[in-house]
C-alpha cells in the first residue's frame, strides 16, 4: 500500500525502554504518583524555558551592555540549570512517596527540595568563584518560589488532563455507538439467525464485547494489546456487513503490545477507515493496521485505500479528538500525523513505551 512513500510524505509535512516502575502500585496511588512524573520531555522543556526566562530578565538588572548581559546570564545559568534538574529528578525519585501524602505535605516537600536546590546553586557559584557576597538567603528564596510555581504546574497539568480526557471519551463514545451502526449490526444478526446461527452468535458476541469496553470505567491509559482487541471486534462486526468489500491486513509487533494509550483511541481511527474507505466504494477497500517498536517508541499506523483517489472529506472531529487525547497522555512525546497520498490515507501515531 505504498507505505514507504506515505512515510516520506509525513517527514516532509512535519519537517523533520519498556518498563513501568509504577505498575506494581495500586491504581489510585499510581495515578497520584504520575502527577509528579517530572522527567517527561514536555515537563523538562517547559521548566527549563520558564527558569531560563527568569534568568534572562534577572541578568538585565546586573548588566550595562549586551555583552555583559550575556555574561551574567551564562553565569547564573551555570548554577540555576543544575539546581533545576536536581529538583526535577528529586521529585521524580520521590513520586511514590509523594503519592501517599496529603496535599499540604506534598507542597511542603516540594518547597523543601526547592530551598535545597537553591542552596546547591548558590554553592556552585561560590565554588566557581562567581559569587562575591554569597547570597544564600536570596538563593534559598528563589528556589522556594520557583519550586512552588513548578509544583503548581505539575498539579494543574494533572487536573487538566482528567476532565478533558473524560469529555473526550464521552464524545468518542457518542461518535462511535451511532444508532445506524447499532441498527445495521442487529439487522445483520436477525438476518443470520435462521440461516447461519453460529455466525449470528459471533456477531452478537463481538457487539457485546464492543459495548463492554465502551461502557467500562474511565481509565487514563490502557495497553495497545487491549486497543487492538477492541478494533478486532469492531472489524469482525463490519466484516459481516461488508463481506469481501472489507479486506483487513494486520502487522503487529509483539514488542509493541505493552505501550500505553488513551482508552478508546484506536477504534475510531479504524471506524474512519471503514467509513471513508470501504462504505462509499462499490469494490471496497483494504484496511491495514500495523504496529512496530523502534527503541523506546512504538509506531502505530492505520491505513486505508480511498475510492476515486480522494473520497468524501470528513469533518476531522475524530482525528482532532485522537490528537488531543494523545497529547494529554504523552505530551510532546506523542506524535499524531495523517496524510493522503495517491489514493491511500494513513494515520500515524508515535507513542513512548
Image: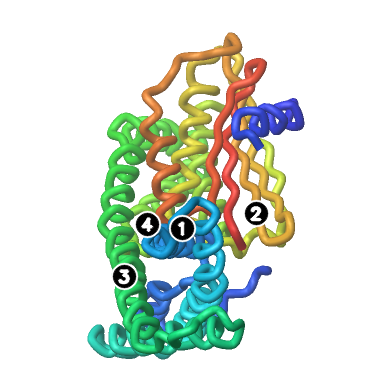
Q: Is residue 45 visible?
A: yes
- Relative to 87, is 221 above or below? above
Q: Is residue 23 visible?
A: no
Circle 1 sits on which residue?
Answer: 49
Residues under numbered marks 1 and 3 in contact, where contact means CB atoms less than 8 Å apart = no
How far is mark 3 from mark 4, CA to CA?
A: 41 Å
- Camera-side residue: 183 or 307? 307
Element at label 4:
helix
Q: Please tell me how crowded label 2 is: few (under 14), some (14-19), or many (20+) other residues with Cα within 10 Å.
A: many
Element at label 3:
helix
Element at label 2:
strand
Left or right placement of residue 297 versus residue 311 in this view: right
Left or right placement of residue 255 versus residue 309 in this view: right
Q: Residue at x 56, y 84 (%)?
A: 124
Residues under numbered marks 4 and 2 in contact, where contact means CB atoms less than 8 Å apart = no
Left or right placement of residue 106 versus residue 73 in this view: left
Q: Residue at x 40, y 56 (%)?
A: 213
Q: Please tell me how crowded label 1 is: few (under 14), some (14-19), or many (20+) other residues with Cα within 10 Å.
A: few
- Relative to 182, is 25 above or below? below
Q: Position of residue 353 (x, y in %)?
A: 61, 63
Q: Please tell me how crowded label 4 is: few (under 14), some (14-19), or many (20+) other residues with Cα within 10 Å.
A: few
Q: Position of residue 149 (x, y in %)?
A: 31, 70
Circle 3 sits on which residue?
Answer: 149
How far is mark 4 from mark 2, CA to CA?
A: 26 Å
Circle 2 sits on which residue?
Answer: 298
Residues under numbered marks 1 and 4 in contact, where contact means CB atoms less than 8 Å apart = no
The mark that comes first in sequence, 2 or 1, is 1
Residue at the farthest front position: 64
- Camera-side residue: 35 or 47? 47
Q: Residue at x 40, y 45 (%)?
A: 324
What is the number of callouts on the image?
4
Amino acid at each position: 500500500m505504498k507505505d514507504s512513500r506515505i512515510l516520506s510524505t509525513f517527514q516532509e509535512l512535519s519537517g523533520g525502554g519498556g518498563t513501568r516502575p509504577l505498575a506494581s502500585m495500586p491504581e489510585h496511588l499510581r495515578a497520584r504518583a504520575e502527577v509528579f512524573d517530572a522527567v517527561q520531555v514536555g515537563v523538562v522543556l517547559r521548566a527549563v524555558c520558564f527558569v531560563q526566562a527568569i534568568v534572562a530578565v534577572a541578568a538585565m538588572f546586573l548588566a550595562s551592555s549586551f555583552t555583559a548581559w550575556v555574561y551574567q546570564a551564562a553565569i547564573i545559568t551555570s548554577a540555576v540549570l543544575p539546581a533545576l534538574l536536581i529538583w526535577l529528578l528529586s521529585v521524580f525519585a520521590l513520586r511514590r512517596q509523594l503519592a501517599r501524602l496529603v496535599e499540604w505535605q506534598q507542597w511542603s516537600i516540594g518547597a523543601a527540595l526547592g530551598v535545597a536546590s537553591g542552596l546547591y546553586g548558590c554553592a556552585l557559584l561560590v565554588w566557581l568563584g562567581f559569587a562575591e557576597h554569597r547570597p544564600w538567603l536570596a538563593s534559598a528564596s528563589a528556589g522556594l518560589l520557583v519550586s512552588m510555581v513548578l509544583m503548581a504546574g505539575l498539579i494543574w497539568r494533572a487536573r487538566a488532563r482528567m476532565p478533558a480526557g473524560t469529555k473526550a471519551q464521552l464524545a468518542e463514545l457518542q461518535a462511535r455507538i451511532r444508532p445506524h451502526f447499532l441498527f445495521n449490526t442487529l439487522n445483520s444478526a436477525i438476518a443470520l439467525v435462521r440461516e447461519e446461527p453460529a455466525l449470528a452468535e459471533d456477531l452478537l458476541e463481538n457487539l457485546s464485547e464492543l459495548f463492554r469496553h465502551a461502557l467500562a470505567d474511565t481509565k487514563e491509559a490502557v495497553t495497545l494489546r487491549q486497543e487492538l482487541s477492541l478494533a478486532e471486534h469492531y472489524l469482525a462486526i463490519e466484516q459481516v456487513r461488508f463481506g469481501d468489500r472489507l479486506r483487513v491486513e494486520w502487522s503487529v509487533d509483539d514488542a509493541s503490545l505493552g505501550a500505553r494509550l488513551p482508552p478508546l483511541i484506536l477504534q475510531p481511527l479504524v471506524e474512519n477507515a471503514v467509513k471513508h474507505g470501504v462504505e462509499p466504494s462499490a469494490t471496497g477497500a483494504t484496511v491495514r493496521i500495523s504496529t512496530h517498536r523502534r527503541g523506546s517508541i512504538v509506531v502505530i499506523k492505520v491505513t486505508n485505500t480511498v475510492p476515486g483517489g480522494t473520497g468524501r472529506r470528513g469533518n476531522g472531529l475524530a482525528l482532532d479528538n485522537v490528537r488531543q487525547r494523545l497529547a494529554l497522555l504523552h505530551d510532546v512525546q506523542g506524535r499524531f500525523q495523517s496524510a493522503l497520498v495517491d489514493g491511500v490515507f494513513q494515520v500515524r501515531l508515535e507513542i513512548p513505551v
